[in-house]
Amino acid sequence: MNILILGSGGREHAFALKLSESNKVNQLFVAPGNAGTSQIAINININPTDFASVKETVLKNNIKMVVVGPEAPLVEGVHDFFLADDELKNISIIGPKKDGALLEGSKDFSKIFMEKHNIPTARYQSFTKENLLEGFIFLETLNAPYVLKADGLAAGKGVLILDSIDEAKKELEEMVSNQKFGEASSTVVIEEFLDGIELSVFVLTDGKSYKILPSAKDYKRIGEGDKGLNTGGMGAISPVPFASEEFLQKVEERVVIPTVNGLQKDGIDYRGFIFIGLMNVDGNPQVIEYNVRMGDPETEAVLPRIESDLFDLFEGVANQNLHEKSFSVTKKTATTVMLVSGGYPEAYEKGKEISGFESVEDSIVFHAGTTIKNNAVVTSGGRVMAITSFGDTIEEALEKSYESIEKISFDKMNYRKDIGFDLI
Ligand code: AMP
Ligand code: GLY
């Protein structure tokens, strides 16, 4: 079968590499892809939210399955677009339709969903500029710190955590009245602050049954010791030592099962990934957020641990017989460390030649923001490469990742040297 992967990051390179290992996959395409995916697939230079171009690519290349990496095409309805088109309706899409994608596309929707299906989450209320004063009153009922979330997609920047109530009121007004995050913040969810340790649990579902994929912890801040600005993610570790079997059992019973059943009860036919951001609060899971895709860089640590044929699992999702598919995961730990452009997540330069990555042997090099220019691999984004290694322990895996990184260089390369610091 020919498969198209939409997206261009390390996550999509990880999908491509895993799918390329399946003998049921003929030709892989990635749109737009990066220098890494071009080694194992054909890159097609189109924007994943340009559905007309996606259609043309699919028909021209006899593609029968589309795996959607990022959230934007899902929230904008790529799956619905396929179902509504006679030439495309029989092509499998791995990713939910618009109705399911609202779990990520609207924080307000996801909170209503959790409340309705009794899924543990922080107490909350939603506000718009019409009831701003009630928002101020609700803030008075909470203790610091105050959590404000733009309802819509805001490129990962829509969550503010503020220490003072005056600041929280000011920011709430900025969000709803002055559109701080554009249309995305015309509704704002205010919720209780959850104090605990964070982890991500990934689920693959065909709408009826599910597989719980390995859990992971992501390091979001740019600076060591979790300091500084938020990024897309600077590294990840899987599994997460504090996610004991007992805790994961609670996650399955209290979160995963009610989520999959809730979608079904609400008439949402969901086929794809659910990324559950959780806080472990005194041993009990509380949901922080849902995403309707895999995480990046979590995917670069999670997928390599899956021993089963990923294509086979995707076929199970498309044909709704996921429960018949075998699923196994290695016990080994995988760690990934992200190499980023100097300056990221603020302004940074692109086009820097990357050297040494071909000589890495003990790690997997996943490309993210890379492209080919004049026969050289150069940087084209803030997050450039994710270096994944296996080990019997976190320390062993990290040592390999950091040794491999020694071989790689580009001008102003930056990375965190303390990934996993809190788990060792
Ligand atoms: P989100 O964009 O929803 O992932 O939120 C960004 C980050 O804010 C999360 O990864 C958490 O670290 C933090 N966060 C969000 N909601 C809460 C909450 N209710 N309590 C504590 N931290 C939170
Ligand atoms: N690494 C966090 C995310 O993919 O949203």
Image (tube, rainbow, N blue to C red):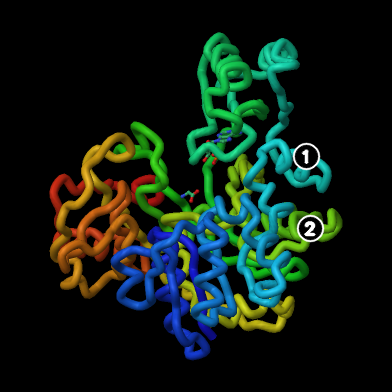
- Label 1 or label 2, whichever lies nearer to me, is 2
- Residue that carries the numbered disc 2 in the rendered image: 268
Judging depth in this view, the residue of 127 and 230 nearest the camera is 127
Judging depth in this view, the residue of 374 and 94 nearest the camera is 374
Residue 402 image position (x, y, % from top left): 23, 59
Query: Which residue occupies the extreme bottom position in the image?
Result: 23
Residue at the image position 31 percent from the left and 53 percent from the top: 338
Under circle 1, the secondary element is helix
Residue 374 versus residue 87 in the image, above or below: above
Residue at the image position 60 percent from the left and 18 percent from the top: 172
Establish whether ligand 1 lies closer than 8 Å to the Cβ of label 2: no
Left or right: 188, with 50 as reference point:
right
Residue at the image position 67 percent from the left and 16 percent from the top: 139
Q: Mark 2 Cα within 10 Å, few/some/many (few <14, many 20+)?
A: some
Residue 5 versus residue 60 in the image, above or below: above
Q: Mark 1 Cα within 10 Å, few/some/many (few <14, many 20+)?
A: some
Residue 190 versus residue 365 in the image, above or below: above
Identify which amino acid the numbered label 2 is placed on: Ile
Residue 395 image position (x, y, % from top left): 31, 60
- Residue 112's disc is 1
Identify which amino acid the numbered label 1 is placed on: Ile
